[in-house]
Image (cartoon, rainbow, N blue to C red):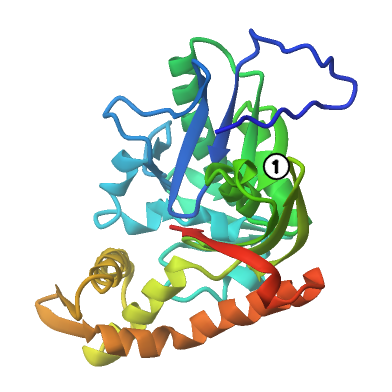
Amino acid sequence: MALLQISEPGQSSIPHHHNLACGIDLGTTNSLVASVISGKTTLIKDDNNEAMMPSVVYCGQGKKLTVGCDACHYAQTDPTNTISSVKRFMGLGFKEVSEFKNCPYRLLENGNNVLFQTAMGDLSAVEISASILSTLKNRAEGALGGDLMGTVITVPAYFNDAQRQSTKDAATLAGIKVLRLLNEPTAAAIAYGLESGEEGIHAVYDLGGGTFDISILSFSKGIFQVLSTGGDSNLGGDDFDALIIEDCRKALDFEKFNASQIQTIKKLAQIAKETLTTNDKAEFYLDDQHYQITNAHFELLAEPLIKKTLLLAKGAVRDAGIEMSEIKDVIMVGG
């Protein structure tokens, strides 16, 4: 894959071979860090040889936050202090996040911000995200053998100014210099090697764990031009899981789930959703009660969400001023 060289204003065009930089995909469900090692783009793995790190932070008693796989272990035993999908809270006010369904966390309104009440104190989404970024930064510096000069961080194309600024603030808190924020669909186009393919118009349909982006890109003479973007910063895999959670609640006649049950069923719903990818049905037990869902029923539940993504996609095509027939191909990515 060809590397795109991006120089900042006033920066010399002569390569700085001793400057270390990396790219971070700060995801709703999982996060990654990569860099160029020996001329190749390389995912940097942890001590367990895992590149993908769950975007989960445990804020239990102690002086240090626990991040990643180790944090996941506390999800059922201490659910209110185990924060996942924090990206969905970035840059949002209390009124917006109070509408989230099946939220197991204790939330406080603090002006325009939302705070998580945890055993380690009241923490913002920025502070929790900073711990994820800091963990990835340390991993990268350990692998590269030196301090990072800067980092490129991906964000949903549809993130507003407040959400983008929150991401920058989290990076600053983690001791990271942000070279730039890169829209996730553009990053996907580069990752899939479109810059070495045919010229033309491409669509990137990016349905992630917590956000949906649709971008229409034009590639010509080695340059990507974003013709239009669309999406929803609160539509993703979590919402498909929520459909199963709500269906289970009704089927098993629960009035509502407690915090521990929510964390348990969130994981069970995710597994069920993935099972339905290749099977006609999925089933699990919650508190000794049996629940089953068929592929056909799940598709019926998910139809409004799918239609919403397609409506946003059509809007992006319209905003780009092109016809559907002009799109050469569609890249489908997500998590």
Query: Measured from the top left, where is residue 79 in percent x and y?
Result: 33, 58
Above or below, 48 relative to 328: above
What type is the residue that disc 1 sits on?
Leu
Q: Which residue is mark 1?
A: 181
Q: Looking at the image, can residue 325 be seen?
A: yes
Query: Measured from the top left, where is residue 127 in percent x and y?
Result: 58, 42
Image quarter hosting the C terminus: bottom left
- 172 or 36, nearer to the observer: 36
Above or below, 163 relative to 109: above
Task: Tell me what residue is drawn at x 44 percent, y 17 percent.
Answer: 143
Residue 111 falls left or right of residue 103: right
Query: Measured from the top left, where is residue 12 in percent x and y?
Result: 84, 14
SS at mark 1? Answer: strand
Q: Quadrant of residue 169?
A: top right
Task: Tell me what residue is drawn at x 45 percent, y 50 percent.
Answer: 118
Task: Tell me what residue is drawn at x 70 percent, y 42 percent.
Answer: 181
Residue 142 falls left or right of residue 247: right
Query: Measured from the top left, where is residue 264 in percent x and y?
Result: 25, 65
Task: Tell me what residue is drawn at x 31 percent, y 41 percent.
Answer: 69
Rate crowding at label 1 as few (under 14), some (14 to 19) or many (20 or more) other CA atoms within 10 Å: some
Image quarter hosting the N terminus: top right
